[in-house]
Image (spheres, rainbow, N blue to C red):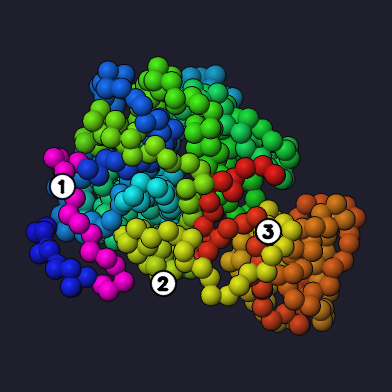
Amino acid sequence: MPTPPRRSPAARPPQRRPRPPVRRKKPRWAMRAVTTLSVVVLASAGIGHAVVTSIDADIARVDPFKDMKNRPRAGHGMNVLLVGTDGRDHITDAERRAYRLGGAPCHCTDTIMIVHISEDRERASVVSLPRDSYAVTPEHTDLTTGQRHRGHPVKINAAYAEGGPNLTVRTVENMTHVKIDHYLEVDFTSFMKTVDVLGGVRICTAEPLKDTYTGLDLPPGTHTLRGGPALQYVRARHVDGASDLSRMQRQQLFLAALIERATSSGILLNPMKFRDVARAVLGSVRADKEFGTAELLDLGRAMRNFSPSSSEFTTVPIGRMGYAVKGVGSTLKWDPRKSERLFRSLREDEPLAAHRSTSRAVRVAVAPQQIRVQVENGTPTAGLGTRVDAALAATGFRTTRQPAGAADRTVKRTVVAYDPRWDRSAKSLATALPGSELRAVKGLGATLKVIAGADFRQVRKVRAENQHQGEFGVMRGDDAGCA
């Protein structure tokens, strides 16, 4: 695609000062960016050339940008596509059994994130793209069959199975209009090695987390997870009814904690330790061809002041849950207006948290993301339960997404039923339902119940005292710590 003519300063938007041209010897300036895992291995500024020269040869190479045309224009800052695949070729039989990795991989992407590094190298923004997102692929050749395909609907994680890194990058760029500058692919092995070489990562949970599919079983409290259990934690999709959306939130919390571990422990201040970390991680990842020794050194210098408090985590705003597509299944459809504003922020190098919601959220004691809710329709009005469930989910509550009919269909006033052990959660939920009645029910358990009555009008936005969220539900990296 031809380079567009450079605009004069007068042609720039009035709110932006003209930026002086940046002269660089090589066009690979873009590699100063970082993926979230790269933060772990590159955050030290004092790494010598001799220490990292041998690491370059350990990186497996891919060419995700081959023959790509009509790409989005480059914005300010740097965008890296971080892809986590379900590859498990180097997993031992014991690890397969222990961490429930025995099934055949689908050769899909378990995780897709755009990591944006600001031009001043002071801020990182991580945007998760749900694996079940509705997407339309560009024309491509199927890697398995060799057949040429026209663009067709898929879940976004299937793009990798059909066309590998190239189709994944093309699909993401087509959907976001954000130019991807670099690509890093991590599989199960490299993830576990990263966590182990750092001595484990500390996470906390206010509720028990149990998933029979991955074997995750964590009681409430603080835990230091090593490689295998950490993989269970970030892979779990059956902990609650929110499935992939809550899994992405756990992934973001884990990555923030991982950054905290790397930047606060002093591990990366030792060049020899840095070399060991880098070899463990980069020896089992795949990166684009421009990812080399010079970029590792340059990136280390650029990330000198990086810290968890300078990072932001969010997920693409979802406009429609359960969007059914023939031949594809149930997908998540992005909110067109909110997602466009989000990606425009990346293109224009703006902090995501700067986009504050126009309606002020009421502060509560417990974050809605920590409150599990079952909705029942207590009226004869068809669809009311679905409407209440969707409104609560949009506000952040972990609804079951399976509203039911109440035994009593003559309820006038909306009821929040709760186990007395979860009274703080109940009060937070009731705040989101103005005029609702709190009703204690011993033995109800951790899932609160909302019985929608005839008085229901709306769900009020709420957020916890320590949440720092904007229009896109932005979480700061330092929000991930345990209280």
Dot in front, 1 or 3: 1
Q: Residue at x 89, y 59 (%)?
A: 441
Alpha-carbon span between mark 2 and mark 3: 28 Å
Up/down of 187 relative to 387, above or below: above
Q: Residue at x 49, y 37 (%)?
A: 259
Please say whether residue 23 is one of the residues in the magenta stretch.
yes
Dot in front, 2 or 1: 1
The residue tagged 1 is: 23
Can residue 149 be seen here? The reply is no
Circle 2 Cα neighbour tier, 10 Å, few/some/many (<14 / 14–19 / ≥20): few
Residue 42 lies, in percent from the top left, at 38, 32
Quick check: 349 left or right of 192? left
Q: Earlier in the sequence, mark 2 or mark 1?
A: 1
Say which quarter of the image contains residue 17: bottom left
In the depicted view, which residue is nearer to us: 311 or 232?
311
Label 3 secondary element: loop
Residue 236 lies, in percent from the top left, at 57, 41
In the rendered structure, which amino acid carries the disc numbered 2? Arg
Magenta residue span: 13-28
Q: Residue at x 44, y 44 (%)?
A: 111
Q: Earlier in the sequence, mark 2 or mark 3?
A: 2
The residue tagged 2 is: 337
Quick check: 165 left or right of 319? left
Predominant secondary structure, magenta span:
loop
The residue tagged 3 is: 465
Alpha-carbon span between mark 1 and mark 3: 45 Å
